[in-house]
Amino acid sequence: MPDDLFRLTVTEAEGALSAGDISSVDLTGSVLDRIDAVDASTGAFLLVTAEAALEQAREADARRSRGDAGPLLGIPLAIKDVLCTDGVATTCASRILEGFVPPYDATVVARLKAAGAVLVGKTNMDEFAMGSSNENSGYHPVRNPWDLSRVPGGSSGGSAAAVAADECLAALGSDTGGSVRQPAALCGCVGLKPTYGRVSRYGLVAFASSLDQVGPLTKSVRDAAVLLSAISGHDSRDATSLPEPVPDYAAALDGSVEGLRIGVAPEYFAEGIDAGVASAVRNAIELLEANGAEIREIALPHTEYALPVYYVIAPSEASANLARYNGVKYGLSDPQAVDVDEMMATVRARGFGAEVKRRIMLGTFALSSGYYDAYYLRAQKVRTLIKQDFDAAFESVDVIAAPTSPTTAFELGGRTADPLAMYRADVLTLPASLAGLAAISVPCGFVDGLPVGLQLMAPPLQEARLLRAADAYERLRPAAPAPRQAVEA
Amino acid sequence: MIDREQVVHVAALARLALSDAEIDRMQADLQQILQAFEALNALDVSDVAPTAQVIPLATVERPDTTEAPLSRDDVMRNAPRVERDQIRVPAVLTED
């Protein structure tokens, strides 16, 4: 038995488990040892549930010995701390939720447990999923496994770093404006944002309800397909979850891009996109073309407006969603306050970090009397124009290819003084979120030792097409030796 | 754009007890961000319908049947102050 089981993909590990070569207890033990060895460097986890994980691993092994099987049975996974876990603390990386223990599982967590997955812990994130660098965690920042002086991206930075540093075989994150795809790109793993409505949001702590989706971060596209099949599908507890049946996404991966029409929009290669990133992405697109895909130039003229539209709509929705943190039902409180208004205002002032306060203020302002039409309503109208750009483009192409992030991972502290500079990190992932598309980031090379992500976008509910294209690229991708991660030093 | 008085008003609406230093910083940040958002005014949206929701879903109904709720003890366990099975909060109505 190899001593580095933690390096396996979900698909590889399932093969070894079903062949009887390894047990889930072996695999889970290896992952927990790995966390012990590297998590002090990455800071990817807020909580490691080692004992519960080993118990789940023993149960998975027992199920296998009884003849049970399944793609996630006995597979160690990590869960972003924005998802409620029954009996396990859930903080959203916020001090205001310190001590909160949910009495129920998020639907996606319940589905993973039913599939026999082993949950090793809760991953770090930007507080309430607001951020692009994971520096907004109320506990500690996450460091990029490729260069510990750099950020992992955000807001699912802990999940991305944990997957990249092999501290789990795969993880769940959440993506509101790019929070799965952007950290996946910066950490060199695969990150999938499903179509809005494909995955239940029940038990996902709400940030911006018209945009939030749960998605997997994985070491391969095939693993992303496996996890998506496991977590997708209608849920009567989420009125926006779609009723369409869930296909076996992994079965769609035939390795072919023959005849696939790929749209490329100049707006995604405009000023502000790092030249090395643009070049790596163009090389990936050329490789797909050389293998039978057809490249077409398309126009997405409202791309530049996605940033202001998102940063009006998402904070507006957040300002309403976060009204529930007031010291009454859970989390931080102030029993000495003279009245309830004072309690709410002081608890919220103490419990929320600077970025969360900024977004609550921005959203409250945009929704306030006299400003609603000028900001919120106007942003919703421009959102329509962004969606119409994609509707028109998808009449002539099957998928759209672009960079995921304008740059590779930036230095910790490099953008914290300038909120707008931080917001621009999401500029290429926001449009697909606003239009409710399916989108994925796949590693497509390195610039100066740091990973670059290729973003593919597909029309709503076309995850099978999206994953087939991404998997085909992954198979074609040159096997250039990857630089050594800093966590290996 | 947004003056200090407005920041104080919005903070009150949002139930955020901001310090004087936070109000100053917030005013500067919001000013900068709202200025960047002026780009949206370049577009003519008079004939455009707003998008609140991207998927075409009709009103969703569920069967009118009862289900087991969360356990009362589990839910109350998270409340900071519980007395006689109820959540206690500071006074909601005060003298002044």
Image (cartoon, helix red, strand yellow):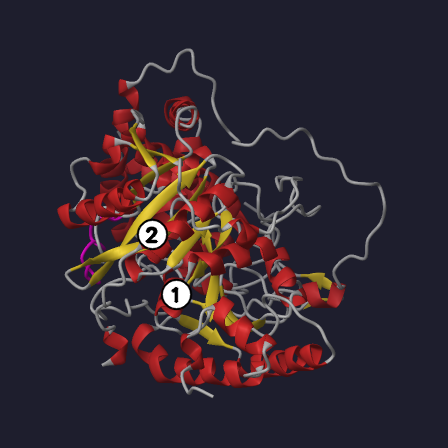
Q: In what element is the residue under mark 1?
A: helix
| Chain to which the residue tagged by mark 1 belongs | A
Residue situated in front as seen by the camera: B80 or A282: A282
A357 lies left or right of A24: left
In this view, B49 is above or below A275: above
A374 lies left or right of A467: left
Q: How many numbered circles are shown?
A: 2
Q: In what element is the residue under mark 2?
A: helix
Classed neighbour count for the residue bearing mark 1: other residues with Cα under 10 Å, few (<14), some (14–19), many (≥20): many
Q: Identify the residue at horizontal 26%, vertical 19% (top origin).
A: B42
Q: What label sits on residue A182 in the rendered view?
A: 2
Q: On the image, numbered disc 1 is attached to which residue?
A: A158
Magenta part of the chain: A410-422
The quadrant of the image that shows the C terminus of chain A is bottom left
Q: Can you give x and y, in whole percent of width and height, for residue A249 in the image?
A: 55, 51
Q: Is the magenta stretch mostly helix, strand or loop?
A: loop
